[in-house]
Image: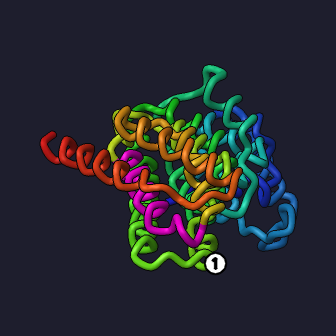
Amino acid sequence: MPYQSPLHLLDSLQIEPDQLNPAGLVQLRKKLLAEFNLTPAITIAIGDKQYTKDEALKAIDQLKEIQHLDDHASIFQDKPLLAWLENPTMALFPYKSIIDLHWSGHSNDFCDEILADALQPYCSFLLKQRRFSPLKEPLSVTFSLPIHYQYGILEVIYEQLEDINSLIDEAKKAPNFKQDQATFGFILYDDWPDFLNSLPEETFEGIINSFCVAAINYTVAAQHDQRYFVYDITHQLVRTNCDEGLKKTIQGNYQVYKANNSNGKGWSSWWFWGFIVLAQFLARACDN
């Protein structure tokens, strides 16, 4: 559940953040009581809202009961940070504000928790839109959090990678250039392997290897009809960190694709050996 500041009350009560301390709230309470004593009206206007005496005093007393008041006040004064924490998928990612909050000595368990609560829907939103470049900064924040706050975000990433692998596996059954490019054409761009390579190896090594296997099998199935698409996919596979056996297969395939792509020759029988290497890799994976 995204963060919701309990301090929006400050706007309607016209309280300055530096008054958010016991002495400041006592003085504010006295000031409001004096204003009610000076007027016969049942309510007084504070900002754009009318308050009865009981409502105004209760609102101030509620502020006194808020835990982590200093942290809430710091967030409330940073409007870009507040906007993103309260609505992660609609506001700009405030990287500088988060750095100031997280690495300036103010970080604590409370701040880490609300950052994680916003990072999870934000990362999910970017992944579903296949926007991998903007994930660089959110992921750097994610990996700086205590590990127990990373789990929900890592799970979202893992599930999205599983979905992508499934799409490619399904597409190899009947390759269709236009449809496949629309579905997973994002794997042709540099930000895709950059994203994969930024993920912690101990968590994602297996599923990244599975992606490479799926992509190689797709290129084998599509090689005769989608020469340039296959070449571009393999060009990015070369940049992807994966199992050494897979790397050798990818590199060998890439050299053949590159040569055939430049001189217009027909495809050779290299793919037969590619399948053998993949079969060996998958057999080793099953044994482990």
Q: Nearer the viewer, residue 220 or 56?
A: 220
Whether residue 102 is situated above or below residue 285 in the rendered picture: above
Using the image as rendered, state which of residue 82 and residue 177 is in the foreground: 177
Q: Is residue 94 visible?
A: yes
What is the magenta range? Answer: 207-226
Q: Position of residue 222 (x, y in %)?
A: 50, 68
Q: Is residue 285 above or below residue 172?
A: above
Q: Nearer the viewer, residue 104 or 13?
A: 104
Q: Is residue 41 left or right of residue 155?
A: right
Q: Quadrant of the C terminus?
A: top left
Magenta span has 210?
yes
Q: Residue at x 41, y 42 (%)?
A: 249
Q: Residue at x 48, y 55 (%)?
A: 268
Residue at 44 percent of width and 67 percent of height: 221
The residue wearing badge 1 is 178
Please state which amino acid type lies under the numbered disc 1.
Lys
Q: Where residue 39 appears, x then y in whole percent? A: 87, 64
Give the percent coordinates (x, y) of residue 22.
Answer: 63, 34
What is the magenta segment's predominant secondary structure? Answer: helix
